[in-house]
Amino acid sequence: MNLISNHLPTAELQALDTAHHMHPFTDGAELAATGPRVITRAKGVMLTDSEGIDYLDAMAGLWCVNIGYGRDELAQVAARQMSQLPYYNTFFQTTHMPAIGLAARLAELAPGDLNHVFFAGSGSEANDTNIRLVRHYWAAKGKPEKKVIISRRNGYHGSTVGAASLGGMAPMHAQGGLPIADIVHIDQPYWWGEGGEEDPDAFGLARARQLEQMIAQLGEDRIAAFIAEPVQGAGGVIIPPQTYWPEIQRICDAHEILLIADEVICGFGRTGKWFGSNTFDIRPDIMTIAKGLSSGYQPIGGSICSDEVANTIRDGGDFNHGYTYSGHPVAAAVALENLRILEEENIIGHVRDVAAPYMAQQWSTLADHPLVGEATIVGLMGSIALTPDSQSRARFSADAGTVGLRCRERCFANNLVMRHVGDRMIIAPPLIITPAEIDLLIERALRALDETYTGLKADGLLKAA
Ligand SMILES: *Cc1c(COP(=O)(O)O)cnc(C)c1O
């Protein structure tokens, strides 16, 4: 397929794609009707498509290109590693330099005594590992009946059978007989959408206490773990009320269950610190990592485990689990180079001191737009809620997502990539974004919002449910 080059006309590329390529999370018939955008190159925060049109990528791909596009150092490292040792496994009592180096570096970066890494090829695989890991952990401690994992509705933990079961996405559960056994869900801490008349702090406490209620209902002797994202990403960038995480931590401390922080999005600087667990003062027993670990330049994920968890697994005999590409040398070498750049260029300091404060200031101005109910942000992950009436936090009468999709289309038309989750618009730009690029992002977002508003009005869709 080397014949396929950027020099083919876009229409031909689209026809080939439509004929042969099945897309993730996509309505295939709809895509075939419109034809996909063909992205051909990228640099910094900017994408270019096959028609030569530039877009500001306010999603960093899928929340992953933390250091920005076009860093040749990573390509050089990958090429060097491929020449020296393109592949070897980490089964059968073997290892290699990239896996050793990356595991040791992650142990330094991760908070507390999270000192041990089990590698996977993605966030989904890492969460599948976590299911096996926590159940095996309790079995090794003589408590095999502790195998239920508590998770949250509208959480996202990946798309394999296990990870999608952990997640609380109703449309995913509706296909393919999910969730698997012994995974249960509590409600999310989404105040704007579900808080009603309660004040946010009381609501945050109430949602956290559902965890304690679930533990009481099922019996502590049956619960293995609770898993959650510090900030829900794919659920719509839901930043929990400030009361939520301290109460979750208290409950996990008070009961004999493991806490898994899914840091796939929040990790590696997204919230202005290395991990969301640092920002929200969470003390997890296991952290899921992927995405920003390699800035998306190579597929890699992992589970970082505490001394206690890792020692129990170590002493529990064979752990009958692993992937051909666990600790893949090229992916691990590229991840290490990514971590070097994040640290040596003080990119997280840039988020904390420059980009996040400026973005927060500019992002909050969007709340003045007549279509916007709230504008929230932590670090460089933010969202706005679209609403026909910001005072009452009303939903649109049109199906959820109708307005969000229209807004996303207006974003593309204004050279901006923002994603919609229902009728929330979300951003998570590369962490290297500059104040001037933030100005451009906001300017384009405002134009997209104006055009969405005009279109809704013209089509009679500015109605509350
Ligand atoms: C993306 C994501 C995953 C899944 O990662 P993949 O690499 O797509 O398998 C898991 N957890 C969270 C929080 C994510 O955002």
Image (cartoon, rainbow, N blue to C red):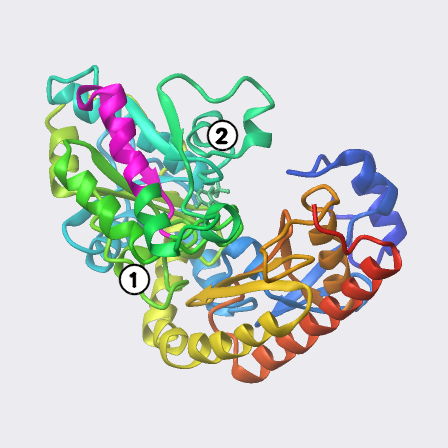
Residue 336 locus on image (x, y percent): 35, 59
- Of 199 and 220, nearer the camera is 199
Q: Quadrant of residue 436?
A: bottom right
Q: Determine which of the numbered discs, if any, sits on residue 335 in the image.
A: none
Residue 63 at least partly seen = yes
Which residue matches tag 1? 279
Instruction: Give the CA separation, mark 2 to mark 1.
Output: 28 Å
Read off the magenta span. 208-230
Within 10 angstroms of label 1, few (less than 14), some, or many (20 or more) residues? Answer: some
Which residue matches tag 2? 160
Q: Is mark 2 within 8 Å of ligand 1?
A: yes
Q: Quadrant of the N terminus?
A: top right
Residue 210 in the magenta stretch? The answer is yes
Q: Name the mark nearer the viewer: 2 or 1.
A: 1
Q: Is mark 1 within 8 Å of ligand 1?
A: no
- Of 56 and 50, nearer the camera is 56
In-image side of 105 versus 265 (left or right): left
In-image side of 301 versus 435 (left or right): left
In this rendering, the answer to whether 74 lies above or below 284 is below
Residue 246 locus on image (x, y percent): 23, 52
So how many labels did they put on this image? Answer: 2
- Name the residue rendered at 21%, 46% in the picture: 249
- Classify mark 1: helix, strand or loop: helix
Residue 33 locus on image (x, y percent): 87, 41
Q: Amino acid at mark 1?
A: Thr
